[in-house]
Amino acid sequence: MARGRPRKTDPDAALDTAMKVFWERGFEGTSMNDLSTMTGMAKPGLYANFGDKEAIYAKAMERYCSAYAGPMLEDLLRSDDSLEITVRRFLDGVVVSATDTMGPKGCFVANNLVECAGKPPSLEALGRYVDEQRQKALAARFQAARQKGELPEDADIKSLAEFYSGQALALAVMARAGAPWTTLYRFVDTAMTLLPAVEAEETGGEKPEIRSEWHEGIIPLTPYKRSVAPGRRPVVYFKAK
Amino acid sequence: MARGRPRKTDPDAALDTAMKVFWERGFEGTSMNDLSTMTGMAKPGLYANFGDKEAIYAKAMERYCSAYAGPMLEDLLRSDDSLEITVRRFLDGVVVSATDTMGPKGCFVANNLVECAGKPPSLEALGRYVDEQRQKALAARFQAARQKGELPEDADIKSLAEFYSGQALALAVMARAGAPWTTLYRFVDTAMTLLPAVEAEETGGEKPEIRSEWHEGIIPLTPYKRSVAPGRRPVVYFKAK
DNA sequence: CCGGCTAAATACCGGTCGGTATTTAATTAG
DNA sequence: CTAATTAAATACCGACCGGTATTTAGCCGG
């Protein structure tokens, strides 16, 4: 089996590269020739494997979610850690991925929100959907926390969810603008002081839809540790799927 | 005097339009033909009056600062109102300008930070400079507040400045993604709860450079009023220069 | 009414855009 | 070795890009 000329480029690896190029340069800032040269896959191959430019962009976004956004929301919903730790890990995860020197700066979703506002829905809706899921996940976690007694009875779940969802956007933009991780972790520290504090035990809250394709990527694990040694960069650990 | 064929388009009005087009569509998303048709000024006229595309973009950014960012920082530094009110007005100003139905959604500066990261310094530096000035202005105001006794002695000025500067970015992105002003005002309310509270009287703190050209635009005035009637949109008042 | 001045308008430049048709190379089944 | 199959590689399409040279239109002082 497997007749015909063998592939030069693995489509999966090509999509991974395409994701990073779109993430780095944006939709308009990336040309099909860019994608072709960066992936090593000739233009006709790109169209044959993925479709037109918009389709590639959408697939790139989905891949980003599988590797980054999805697992973070997953952790937010599934983790047994305290609210404090879980939310902190969520924001730390944004910092880590947004300042990772191995990848583009910032957050693909945030970039999409800014760049593609007012563009065709096929582009505009991508980031908005993820943003909405993120907010729902936060709200669900806060809801559960309130029922568990981790938050006071009068805590405003919606406001808290909107707030911490917004912090992720702020971190993303600051990272893209070149802010160092030290600054961003300080920012997280500050933002975390807004979280009301109490203590008890239980569960609940309805969980938002998390696309199953999003679970393929690397996901945060760890006994979570922050600021291990002074000056040493604290790390949120990931493992391959 | 005033010989030759009369101008069809006032260059100042043209630049104002160009600013809004760039603000709305971004640098790459705007073509010279777009600018020509939107401003009513033919392409050679644009080049003669403003220079090439990058130069127009830079002038558009400067104009944005004159009309929006600059006056807000000015108010932040010069206002005699309490810290609470001043910071709140700053964030409310972001909400108002970022959701104004008469203009593009979001913030030109934030858009630039996201889109132009990694692009030539002539583009990249524009937003970063404004962002830096904003943070300095906030820091100066917090510094003054601490000396006046509006903040506790141990308040972390740098962290607070970074935090509230980041809130402006978060608001800008959320607004651009279509969040309604009701949501954004709720967000401001939440963010304001992070500000430590005390009371007393005095002044101080060095003020950052605010470009004089930035003072030409509309500036916030007002006996400041928030949430006048339930359901009615609270307004930050502006006056023409 | 004319000649000079200024800006608008048009046409045009080479280059690149997203997208595709065509040709060539590499492999397997018979 | 041949035919079929698959993908790579090249060349190419019309449209539009940023930028400019050239022509045309409108107003002035004389």
Image: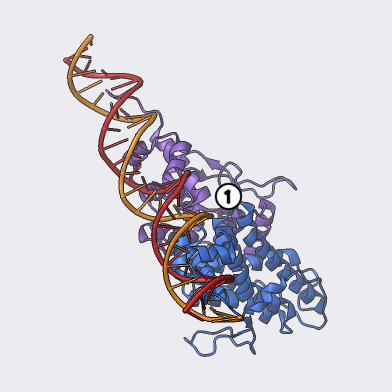
Chain colours: A purple, B blue, C red, D orange
Q: Nearer the viewer, residue A214 or B1?
A: B1
- Where in the figure is residue B123, as x and y percent of width and height? 60, 57
- Is residue A87 depicted above or below A41 in this figure? below
Q: Nearer the viewer, residue A117 or A225?
A: A117
- Where in the figure is residue C2, as x and y percent of width and height? 50, 74
Rendering quarter of residue B223: bottom right
> Which residue, given by chain and number where applicable, does mark 1 sit on?
A105
Q: Nearer the viewer, residue D26 or A116?
A: D26
In terms of secondary structure, where does tag 1 sit?
loop
- Where in the figure is residue A65, as x and y percent of width and height? 45, 50
Q: Going 74% across and 64% down the picture, which residue do you hit?
A: B158
Q: Is residue A164 left or right of residue A56?
A: right
Q: Going 40% across and 61% down the picture, which residue do you hit?
A: A119
- Is residue B64 depicted above or below A178 in this figure? below
To which chain does the residue with label 1 belong?
A
> Which amino acid type is marked by label 1?
Lys
Q: Is residue A109 left or right of residue B86?
A: left
Q: Quadrant of the N terminus of chain A?
A: top left
